[in-house]
Image (tube, rainbow, N blue to C red):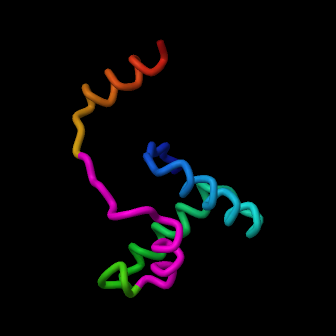
């Protein structure tokens, strides 16, 4: 079963990830699915153990910022952007 997921990343990170995916003849969605599949395989206990940690650190800018938002705030944000 396919499920749609919305993620927010720095534009530069997305551009580099798209280039990486294209160079490897895959889509950004499949690349992301592959990474999540690897992470959840149970073989890794921390992000430092994950083989792409160095690549992720190279394309990332600064520390990751996690925002918890309600469905209502996401819906409001979406509709406000559409105007």
Q: In the visual, does 27 lie left or right of 37?
A: right
Give the extent of the magenta segment: 50-67
Q: Nearer the viewer, residue 6 or 54?
A: 54
> For residue 42, which quarter of the picture?
bottom left
What residue is drawn where x is 39% and y is 17%? 80
Give the farthest residue toward the front.
Answer: 62
Find out whether residue 4 is within the magenta segment: no
Which secondary structure class fits the magenta region best? Answer: loop
6 relative to 49, above or below: above
22 relative to 2, above or below: below
> For residue 30, which quarter of the picture?
bottom right
- Count of residue discs: 0
What residue is drawn where x is 56% and y is 54%? 12
x and y, in percent, of residue 48 in the image:
37, 84
Q: In the visual, does 52 lie left or right of 26?
A: left
x and y, in percent, of residue 33 in the image:
53, 62
x and y, in percent, of residue 31 in the image:
60, 63
x and y, in percent, of residue 3 in the image:
48, 46
Q: Which of 16 and 43 is in front in this view?
A: 16
What residue is drawn where x is 39% and y is 73%? 40
Q: Which of 71 and 67 is in front in this view?
A: 67
Q: In the visual, does 24 lie left or right of 5?
A: right
Q: Which of 9 and 30 is in front in this view?
A: 9
What residue is drawn where x is 68% and y is 66%? 20
74 relative to 40, above or below: above
């Amino acid at each position: 079963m396919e499920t749609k997921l919305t993620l927010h990343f720095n534009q530069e990170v997305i551009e580099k990830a798209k280039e990486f995916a294209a160079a490897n003849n895959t889509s950004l969605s499949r690349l992301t699915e592959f990474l999540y599949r690897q992470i959840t395989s149970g073989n890794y206990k921390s992000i430092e153990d994950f083989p792409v940690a160095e690549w992720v650190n190279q394309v990332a800018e600064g520390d990751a910022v996690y925002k918890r938002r309600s469905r209502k705030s996401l819906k409001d944000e979406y509709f406000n952007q559409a105007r």
